[in-house]
Image (spheres, rainbow, N blue to C red):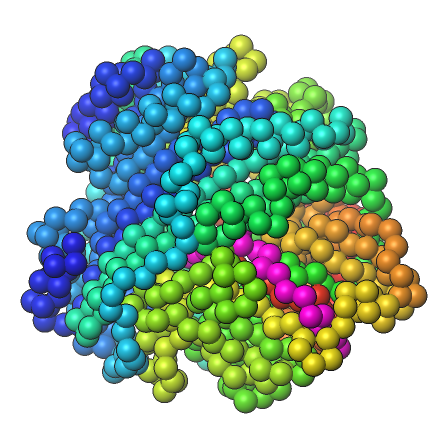
Amino acid sequence: MDELLRICDAAVGMARSAGADEAEAFAVTSQEINAELQKNDIQVAKSMSSAGLGIRVFKNGSLGFSSVNSFGESETREAVDRAVAIASVVPADRHSGLPEPAEVTPVEGIYDAAIESYGVENAVNDALMMLNEAKGVDARVTIDGGGVEAGWGMRAVVNSHGVRQAERSSLIMCFIMGMARDGDSISSFDYQFDNSHKADGIDPGVVARDFAGKVIGSLGAVSGESFKGTVVLAPKATTEIVVQPIEYSILASTVQKGTSRFADKLGESVASELITVTDNSRLENGFSTLSFDREGLPPGVLPLLEGGVVRNFLYDSYTARREGRASTGHAGGGASSVPSVSATNVVMSGGTVSVDEMISGVDRGVLVTRFSGNTDPSSGDFSGVVKGGYMIRSGKLAEPLTGTLIAGNIFDLLPTVTAVSRETERLFNVVAPHVRLDDVSVTSG
Amino acid sequence: MRDILKTIAADAKHWTELRVHDRRALQILVRKGTLETAAYRKTCGVGVRVLVNGTWGFSSTGSLERTDIERAVRDATASAEASSAGRLEKIERLAECELAVGDFTSGNAAELATHTTEEKAALVVEAERRTRDASDRIRSAMSRYTELIDEKWIVSTDGADAHIEDAKAEFVIAATAASGDDMVMSYQGAGVTGGWPELFARWTPEELSGRVAKMAVDLLDAPYAPGGRTTVVLAPDLVGLLAHEAIGHTVEADFVLSGSAAADKIGERVASEHVTLVDSGPASIGAPSAGGVVLVDDEGVHAQKSVVIENGVLKSYLHDRESAARFGVAPTGNSRAWLYRDEPIIRMRNTYLEPANGDAKSLDELVAGVNDGFLLKGANSGQADATAEFMFGVQEAYEIKKGKLGKLMRGATISGDAFDVLKSVDAVSSDFEWSIGTGHCGKGQPAKVDGGGPYVRCELTIGGR
């Protein structure tokens, strides 16, 4: 990691010499091995290494950014010169600037050296195992794509005010997607995945069997009914329809642009008291768990919605300066992008009822396993197709559905959420429960 | 560069493809008066693909040094060897074809370079301000300018030896109009393989600001469209999106092989006789500056005009050399990689419906034939999958009653089975527009694509509320 920090130090020094008032360098190295499935077979095995260096400068209050995928001196020099050249010709912004250092407590459990020795052979074997497990559930399952990927690397950030941080991380991930086909009957397209920072943290076989069960269950789907009423969102659908609009609305950038529905609602209730959402950068084995953000500041754990009440917005140093306050440590982005506010792990807390209890209380409704559509996070309007869904009749799951659309406005619906499940599921950086909504338009064509 | 690649290829024990890709990207983005991005990105390296014992191995390096490229060849070979025992169906051969040799240039990098960074920044800053100032009901606006300048060398052990230069540019404006908690967004732009004359051929930046601002404000006053199955006239942008997302993906040969809705349907009627659907590397119709132009694909295959559906009958899938060999056809030049570190996979390029030539109708005539329905314009993000079931957001829905255009409505989405929709097409106009050139297609890696078509009348389901 010292080497990576030295590369950043050199780039910052070069940028200051080239005329930048303030300079920041963010460097990453990564290695990845990967076995990919396609068309019910192994498609390709890969082994790759990559690097990235992003240089952000400010000159007379103007931003310049440049990135390069190599640490060579001439490439770094070119990137620095490009960044300074851009800063010399674009308009200034009085809120621009880099942050001062803050104390960072390293987070545990995001790096496992065992992932470095996992190897292409194991990736290939685990990918084949997924194929066999899925096909073993039912021969009608067909796998479009998927695979196993293991990656590890380092990131470092240095700025001219003294920020200087580096850390290692690793991630192993398995993924499977496809459908079931029985003659002319094709199931909903679906996917399943798991990931972990630890080499033994995923079970590709379980992921494959879960996927197979889902697509087989949605064979023979029929078009349902049109009505306005209850829908139960499963975690994937909760993520798209409920969590992502909340996540968008608590970013200081959207609040300041006036496109957040929570803009003037700090301390006010915007949702049912069943809804509590937290940004947790230190979540154990969380996909986005990290010690410091893209600017080198520590994000910590912040309540966003507590019992339906808006508690905090997330800031990077630019949005914080606009309000004369401190960053919450939520600058996101990689080596090739200008930092911008983003959440880390967004955790929606589970409720007190089980999924079965939630469904048993529904006389007529739809279970939305997956949602394929558009959610406009600023207005809250959502509209899309129910994938792998089921009718709920008299408290029980009935026929699988196809050609069914749901639509509504999530901000209008949030105060009337009638149940949140005890069980939650981790989907990349989001942890989500099942959520029951009333008054949703269901259209069957 | 070419000489190093040819020397390494000459020493290769297996089929090997070396692809150097130098990507220079400039992006400037302003949102509500804040310059959020002013960035120049260079991504350069070599992607190495080998075929060993009937399976693929891939590796990449960000270095152009000979020793690093040779190491990547060894890594790719080791990966292929590790996976070959597990591969059920071995790749026996790649389809033979005349591989590209020589220099291929598309776009106009030289013209783009005549505009300074300062000029590009000013374009974006002014466009955003102008859009935001157009009405006091506009709460936020965004403007973005992007350039992608590519230089590639592709050398394979079986004869590809191509040097490719391409330049694409994009300009987009968005506006959010609001009244209290009610918010609505409108956006429009252009994405071309070309320079500024092509980028601003349809609309000047000023016209674009005006259109986007007006539409956002008009939509704010518009009621929500009602749901239900109905007759619609689709504008070229939605036709392009439908052709790409809902049909195009189902005819990508890799999806076909895993059982897409188009599997086993070559020679069958899959659409009405009014439908001829094409995916083309060069812009084989309309303006030559379509945003998805590819002259030579990333396997060194000359990019073809592929007629996918001809007068309603499915004629061809979209192939790379592997799938073409399996189907016993010629490759279509659809193998593309986003960056050096991505391996080439089957992607679309410019996907469109042909306008009518014989019984062409004007847009007015298409509308006149609708008793109760909608004219739909403006593609929001779309979703579709290999089953051909799709869902797209629509920006503008104009009511049609008894053949007359009526009021603007918002919030409509369209969905259905794309082949059912194409079977219901009963008329297409003689117009043609490329209109989805600002979009990126995602399939594990992005790709610049375009699409378009005439106005098309058909039946589908509108989701409203």
Indicate the position of residue A219 as horizontal and vertical percent values.
60, 74
Q: Nearer the viewer, residue A196 or B402?
A: B402
**Image height check: is B294 above or below B107?**
below
Residue displayed at 9% across by 62% down = B7
Indicate the position of residue A37 as horizontal and vertical percent values.
36, 67
Indicate the position of residue B29 as horizontal and vertical percent values.
51, 33
How many numbered discs, if any?
A: 0
Stretch in magenta:
B426-449
Residue displayed at 28% across by 81% down = B96
Q: Is residue B448 on the magenta stretch?
A: yes
Q: Is residue A75 left or right of residue B123?
A: left
Q: Quadrant of residue A104?
A: top left
Q: Nearer the viewer, residue A441 or B407?
A: B407
Q: Is residue B154 left or right of residue B332?
A: left
Quadrant in which the C terminus of chain A is drawn: bottom right
The reply to whether residue A414 is visible in this rendering is no
Quadrant in which the N terminus of chain A is drawn: top left
Indicate the position of residue A241 as horizontal and vertical percent values.
64, 46
Q: Nearer the viewer, residue B461 or A427?
A: B461
**Image height check: is A111 above or below B51?**
above
Residue displayed at 39% across by 70% down = B303
Residue at the outermost bottom position: B267
**Image height check: is A12 above or below A169?**
above
Q: Nearer the viewer, residue B255 or B16?
A: B16
Q: Quadrant of residue B11?
A: bottom left
